[in-house]
Image (cartoon, rainbow, N blue to C red):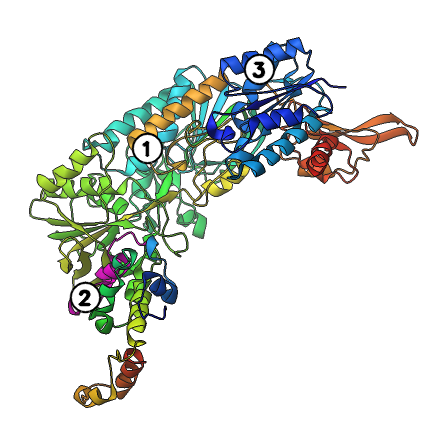
Amino acid sequence: MQKIGVFVCWCGSNIAATVDVKAVAQALKNEAGVVFSTDYQYMCSENGQAMIRQAIKEHQLTGIVVCSCSPRMHEATFRKTAVSAGLNPYMVEIANIREQCSWIHKDIAEGTEKAIVLARAAVAKLHKNAPLTAGTSPVTKRALVIGGGIAGIQTALDVADAGFEVDIVEKSPTIGGRMAQLDKTFPTLDCSACILTPKMVEAAQHEKINIISYAELESLSGFVGNFTATIRKKARFIDEDKCSGCGVCTEKCPSRKGLDEFNMKLNKRGAVYIPFAQAIPNVAVIDAEQCLHFRTGKCGLCQKNCSAGAIDFEQKDQLIERKYGAIVVATGFKPIDASAFNEYAYNDSPDVVTSLEFERIMNAAGPTKGQLIRPSDLKHPHEIVVIQCVGSRCTEDKEKGKPYCSKICCMYTAKHAMLVREKYPDVKVHVFYIDARTPGKNFDEFYRRAVEQYDVDYIKGMVGKVAVEGDKLHVQGSDLLNGEQVHINADMVVLATAIEPDPTARSLGTMLTASMDTNDFFTEAHPKLRPVESPPAGIFLSGVAQGPKDIPETVAQAGAAAAKVIGLLCKNELTCNACVAQTNEAICNGCSQCEKVCPYGAITYEDKEIRSPEFRGIRRIATVNEAICQGCGACTVTCPSGAMDLKGFTNSQIMSEVDAICR
Amino acid sequence: MSLTNKVTAEDVLRISGVDASRCMQCGKCSGACPNYDEMDLHPHQFAALLRKGEVERLMESNALYQCLSCFACSQRCPRNVEPAKIIEAVRLTVIRQKGRNYMTADRLPEKLDEDLPQQALVSAMRKYSK
């Protein structure tokens, strides 16, 4: 028979306002096995914990029930308290009478009744608790960063500087990501490439960093500290070790129909190409869909002209298997497809461009060599209209667009307007905005500079329609402040399109069992207190994969994710979960169903000798690897014979709880 | 509608089926409106005034009869507020009242125009009277 102590917390007025805590403590005194029951204002305080320790010793308690907030908040606290008084940590049960009781009830009689029932259930469970001991597992001291944009690069640098090996897996042929495509950065207007490329070089030269470009994560197994990843390195048909990046092949290639992804498909590139001058690795890649050799079996000009002999048409995809202790998701974003917004004539005129396309047009390394000219007739525009919030802040039931604010558009629009006015004072710039959202250090000052110093025409309102009229774009929108409809004959229209997570995010999230929101952004383990961790242990979040953010925020978050990774990798071993599955060998018939549902691959089968009254002989029995089992319970509900049980949450414990509730 | 003929914002919301609280006053509806200059109140104002409960002002507006019911505002609205439905609902609350038909048969002769399809007059009768 257990000797149980019950401790009812007031949580100030959080619980005590809707639950009669004294009545709960009094009622529980009558429960079988309860030898001590009390209430206190803040059980989690030092005094509250001292009270628990003293009661354990004084009444020789074998287990305690704390009626308080969710176990997610303070279960760890009370387990430590119990341990310091000599109890096994798994002899502690929490009855959640706050989130699941006081916060959702208004009537004190109802709240009290429910609190008593929840406490009784916890007592009933505790009667069947047994002390558990957690095992340990080793930590592989290497991190995998998925995505080689500024978020991934920064996380990799910080982790590598702490002395740990890092692999960056980047799906495109070069690292650098979106930031490499930007012209200038707000609010300082410094050149994006000038501040990014030194970091790219630093990552490439770092002895602890290994860049695996043109590669994607194929599968992942294992658990925190012990992940095994399979990475598919796509065939680029170039020997990376031989290619010197001289670029002769890219000049000789006769195929000129491929669209230049780096320049947002505004110009054509060869079938063999290097994305941009500062690409890392500085190695060419062959686009097999465009390459004449792959299409017709002829050509091979690049091969003939490559003095390094690096062209390898026979190259195949390569699978790399490697172990990691931690995984960082830094998959970033892409602008949404603007073609759904044909009220802005995006499909009708090449002079209607997205902001990222405009960024390439303004960039000295872009398709126009940085000259502001219209894509349609290569003429200099005199009047430009920028439309903000294209696809942002739409309701969820809208077929197109995103419900969130993309956060960076107000600032990059002010930047674009300023850059144009600085370089071409003859160009008029009108910006249609709903709200100019500029919270951030020196951000509002930046926006005001666009208005005051650069005389950018900010119009509060949205554009309802853009129509192609001759070589002009007729923009019709509302000016809400002046109460009129405005008509502008513009030469170019720039759409400040919303951003969305990279399309690979959803499948990656499924592979990592990481949770995501309805917009495919990765969700954090706690929105305030664990902002760079994904709920599954060992998976961390960096950059826009978690939500829209600008470069300074991304870099800050990347550093935070790195700190978490370092905190994990510097441990030699991790304490496992003690609440793992176990097989009742007398009942298991080796049907393999549990093995199939186990998401961690923790179950294997062994032929064991069974000696029971019903059966004698060798039988195939499920065996749980306790270091791998995460205690999810999938096997316990799948097992048709009831042979699988979860320690700490056995079927009999749960049935006792249900019985106590229904009593 | 209550028996007192007093039209409330709730009445208009119910008849239109619109959730005006979702409007963020971006003005895309009024930016899209092809008959903006003829209207004294504009699509975004219908959502805004309805939120404030100022139904009387909407009922007195001549915009009720200038709106072409082209539904451009509803189609473009990023938040599915559908201002055209609000305008339609307010117009209905007006013409359902006694003696508030906007279009009566005796006004037909003055509207006759060779270039105007007769179907338009039939629709106008349907739209602007009980």
Q: Identify residue for label 2.
A: B36
From what the image shows, is residue A35 above or below residue A466? above
Crowding at label 1, few (<14), some or many (≥20) Cα neighbours within 10 Å? some
Residue bearing the label numbered 1: A279
Q: Are marks 3 and 2 in contact (CB under 8 Å)?
A: no
Residue A168 occupies which quadrant of the picture? top left
Amino acid type of disc 1? Ala
Q: Secondary structure at mark 2?
A: helix
Which residue is drawn at the image coordinates 57% and 13% (left, top)? A51
Badge 3 marks a residue whose secondary structure is helix
Q: Is residue A615 above or below residue B129?
A: above
**Mark 3: which amino acid?**
Lys
Cα distance in 3D space between marks 3 and 1: 52 Å
In the picture, measured across the screen, residue A9 lies left or right of residue A456, that is right
Which residue is denoted by mark 3 in the rendering? A80
Q: Is residue A558 magenta?
A: no
Seen from the viewer's position, the closer of residues A345 and A402 is: A402
* Extent of the magenta region: B23-48
Reply above or below: A172 against A195.
below
Quadrant position of the N terminus of chain A in the picture: top right
In which quadrant will I find the C terminus of chain A?
top right
Q: Is residue A320 left or right of residue B5?
A: right
